[in-house]
Image: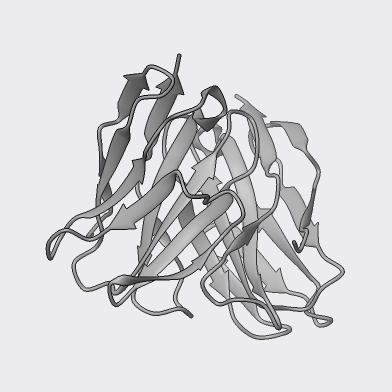
Amino acid sequence: EPEVTQTPSHQVTQMGQEVILRCVPISNHLYFYWYRQILGQKVEFLVSFYNNEISEKSEIFDDQFSVERPDGSNFTLKIRSTKLEDSAMYFCASSRDPNSPLHFGNGTRLTVT
Amino acid sequence: GQQLNQSPQSMFIQEGEDVSMNCTSSSIFNTWLWYKQDPGEGPVLLIALYKAGELTSNGRLTAQFGITRKDSFLNISASIPSDVGIYFCAGYYSGGSNYKLTFGKGTLLTVNP
């Protein structure tokens, strides 16, 4: 069964550094998302992306965050200047359309020191 | 933002027992989804519900979309050790964005063999 793949599985970075988290959504899906999960807490919406532009973003998704679909298969989340509180699991997800269930990747664990 | 109240927070049961968990909200939802998350992995879709009153099964799992559209439950029958994990309800609420999935806080299930 097709799946969403994310790399790396774990990223450790120093505060203030830039990180790029990568995702390959399911190939026939058109809607892409980033969610995050702080340890022990619920999954939170960050941003949705369709047709090469952001459809919606949460208040968490401030100017430090950006998303990009650099080619036909990858979908990236960039954090420009990481903060300690950015430490979390970041999940990429995709869906065929807005009404279809999301399929999640296995996440990237980001640790900011 | 909209809140999903998921209960119980955790359950400790013996193998073979049935399990029930639910989610409620003060808002009307158009779609209810149930996900399971194993440690270190992303949420995996278990069941999707799209209509009020809908009752759907997936093996030993049964979920229902409440008639009021403000609640949903998930039942697991004859639990087995591999049912261990965190179960999340999630949904799109009426009048909200179809791009932003709202998650409950999860139910941690432990199954004693």
Image location (x, y in percent) of residue A43: 58, 46
Q: Is residue A62 above or below residue A2?
A: above
Image location (x, y in percent) of residue B97: 60, 76
Image location (x, y in percent) of residue A17: 35, 25
Q: Nearer the viewer, residue A25 or B53?
A: A25
Residue A73 located left or right of residue A93: left
In the picture as drawn, the residue positioned furthest to the right comes out as B26
Q: Nearer the viewer, residue A19 or B55?
A: A19
Please say whether residue B79 is visible from this viewpoint. Answer: no
In the picture as drawn, the residue positioned furthest to the top comes out as A113
Task: Name the image quarter holding the N terminus of chain B.
Answer: bottom right
Residue A106 located left or right of residue B83: left
Please say whether residue A13 is visible from this viewpoint. Answer: yes
Residue pictured at 57% horizontal, 64% vertical: B101
Q: Nearer the viewer, residue A37 or B40?
A: A37
Quarter of the image where one finds residue A75: bottom left
The structure's colour scheme is: one colour
Residue B70 located left or right of residue B110: right
Task: Name the image quarter holding the C terminus of chain B.
Answer: top right
Q: How many numbered markers are drawn? A: 0
Residue pictured at 12% horizontal, 61% vertical: A71
Image location (x, y in percent) of residue B91: 63, 67
Q: Is residue B101 above or below residue B97?
A: above
Q: Nearer the viewer, residue A18 or B72?
A: A18
